[in-house]
Amino acid sequence: MPTVRNAGTPAPFLLQGKRFEDTFRQSSVDYQRRFRTRLRTLPAHVPEPALVVLTSAHDAEIDRLSLELGLQGFPLYRLDADDCADRRLVLNPDSGTMRIDGLLVRPALLWIRHFVPNSVVADGPPLIGRYVRDQWASVLEVVREWPTTHVNPPVSRRASRLAQLRQAATAGIPVPATVLASSAEEAADALGCPPTDLIAKVIGDHFVQPEPARVTGVFPRRVTAPGTAPEPVPLLFQRYLPHSHELRVFNVGARLFAYKIRKHDPRDVWADPEAVSVTAAEVPAPLARQIETLLRRTGYAFSGFDFLITPDGTPVFLECNANGDWAWFERGASDSRVSEAALHHFTTHPALSPTGERDFRG
């Protein structure tokens, strides 16, 4: 018989208190997808070389990139987790082609971003929903192995936060003292500090999706009390470091772009965005060299690196987001450096070339 947790057991630490909850839209505004049959210029039997993206309907970065690439004649095919159960898909790894809604495509570049199997909508009872989502998770594994050029190599993209910290430390970048533990007390004992000197994080995704389109944030938070109940799954605990601000550094190919973030609480970016200040910044030369070392080891073409900047100016590595979402930072800083670099990266990529003029008038 499965073990039943006591009904009085407190909620997991990162789900206690006021929660960030939201509903993602389930229909993208991707212009190339909207006008797909009108835009295609090749015969039906000829696979169209394209950038193929597996993501979600709320991916604003791909919405914009699809339009800008399309206006220059570069096709982008998109598969969103939100409605993939209703799409027609043929995967042929022997020929290296995909047929998406009846259209033959050769993924010259493949980018796996926000494709989360829990976003897949499946009609019917819970058993069918679980079956469909589990199987789409397996389809995603097949796509990770696809014989083509991946924007971010699948192995590096899936590196855990602990693996990322090891990579950074090996590259000579300071990292916080870190341990994976089932309680703050055990983590504090391992790290030799009081529990209230700890920051708690999930080891996996920062969002929980109890059902398609509904999300709850599980964001880093400071341990504020000395006694906490054991967690149902180990958390990543790090020793708190005083800092003046945070720095998000994006790489687009070999180019680096930084944004300085000031906030009062680790969760303010999601829970209280009005309290967060974002400004464009330059990447210090020593940090740029360290990031370049990491990029040579990981092969990331797009990513976002998070650092704490201590009072003496030392950057401390926190994690790397392989999706590299940049729209929120650009809005906060009122600039478009990363968007412009992303468009240039794809329109000059040796794997891609325009296949015909695009007309979005409808």
Image: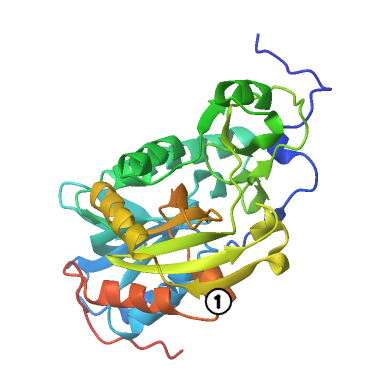
Q: What is the image's colouring?
A: rainbow
Which of 341 and 262 lies nearest the eye of the viewer? Answer: 262
Identity of the residue furthest to the bottom in this view? 361
Residue 32, visible in the rendered structure:
no
Which of 300 and 164 lies nearest the eye of the viewer? Answer: 164
Residue 15: x %, y % from top left? 72, 39
* Residue at 79% from the left image edge and 18% from the top image edge: 6
Identity of the residue furthest to the top in this view? 1
Residue 117: x %, y % from top left? 50, 45
- Residue type at mark 1 is Ala
Which of 77 and 64 lies nearest the eye of the viewer? Answer: 64
Residue 71, visible in the rendered structure:
yes
Q: In the figure, is residue 132 to the left or right of 103?
A: right
Residue 280: x %, y % from top left? 50, 74
Residue 198: x %, y % from top left? 64, 36
* Residue at 37% from the left image edge and 79% from the top image edge: 340
Q: Is mark 1 on a helix, strand or loop?
A: helix
| Residue denoted by label 1 | 333
- Quadrant housing residue 278: bottom right
In the figure, 176 relative to 302: above or below? above
Q: In the figure, is residue 279 to the left or right of 227?
A: left
Which of 9 and 127 lies nearest the eye of the viewer? Answer: 9
* Residue at 35% from the left image edge and 63% from the top image edge: 251
